[in-house]
Amino acid sequence: MKIFGFQIPSVFSLLIWAGVWEVIGQLEWVFIFPPLSGVLIELWDLVGTNAFHKASISTLKSFCYGMFFAITGGVSLGFFMGRVDAANKLLGMWVNIFASAPLSSLVPVLILLFGLGQTTIIVTVVLFAIWIITLDTLAGIKHVSPSLIEMGQSFGASRWNLLYKILFWAALPEILAGIRMGFIRAVKGVIIGQLLVSIIDFGQMFATFSRNLYMEEFWALTLVLFVFALGISSLIGEMEKRVEYYAGVRD
């Protein structure tokens, strides 16, 4: 970002918004926005509680299980659709529908299928993340030059070597982009699952804070999730930069 020709670090914009938030909170213009200073103080107190530690461990466990299945299933499905035209024609429409559908409306159906528990939350995470991973993997496979595949076949590459040593690495930039977006959607999925399934862990804390108008605690917990999602996204973004080379060699 440049102001009057001077390069300003991107973090400066966050400081501007933090200042605006603090001013609005101090002036009490909107009751749902308490001063940011109060939110940060409450955040420090919140992360030290046993309830937060227990909710964090349980939420992280559901999140990791869900993302494991979402990545495994999404990448596999994307490869299958990218390599088999019949599968792409048969499944492509449904993948796009689920990618754009309001998936929170399906949670009551998941409760009927899997009951009130962690299984439903894990499935919710999978549903929120898997489709974008599938679509980005499919895009990566479609962008691989046929000549690159023909070269591998001419050197006697087996089906497994063709998939892993050529297609996977050539499509890796799009796969990582899909995983990055999947992680962000999964954060939303795990909280929605906790809120709608059985009001547990972070979902229970959000419900309690909002119901009792504990806005400082509410925003403190929201900041935790924002930082987690942003941190994961930034980490995978750095991985994307390191594999940009493969996006060039596939042509």
Image (spheres, grey):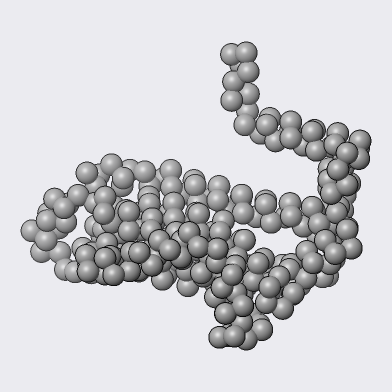
- State the residue in front, 134 or 30: 30
Answer with the quarter of the image where residue 210 lies: bottom right
Say if residue 60 shows up in the picture. no
As drawn, 211 above or below 25: below
Q: Residue furthest right?
A: 27
Left or right of 114, for residue 56: right
Residue 117, percent from left and from top:
66, 82
Locate the N terminus by quadrant: top right
Residue at the image point whose x is 61% and y is 61% from the top:
187
- State the residue in front, 25 or 156: 25
As drawn, 29 above or below 58: above
Residue at the image point whose x is 85% and y is 54% from the top:
215
Answer with the quarter of the image where residue 138 lies: bottom left
Residue at the image point whose x is 68% and y is 30% from the top:
12
Residue at the image point whose x is 71% and y is 70% from the top:
195
As drawn, 80 above or below 155: below
Answer with the quarter of the image where residue 62 lies: bottom right
Residue 208, percent from left and from top:
84, 67
As drawn, 114 above or below 30: below
Locate the C terminus by quadrant: top left
Say if residue 31 shows up in the picture. yes
Left or right of 205, for residue 191: left
Q: Residue furthest top?
A: 4
Left or right of 93, for residue 191: right
Residue 99, percent from left and from top:
46, 61
- State the residue in front, 40 or 117: 117
Q: How many marks?
A: 0
Residue 185, percent from left and from top:
56, 59
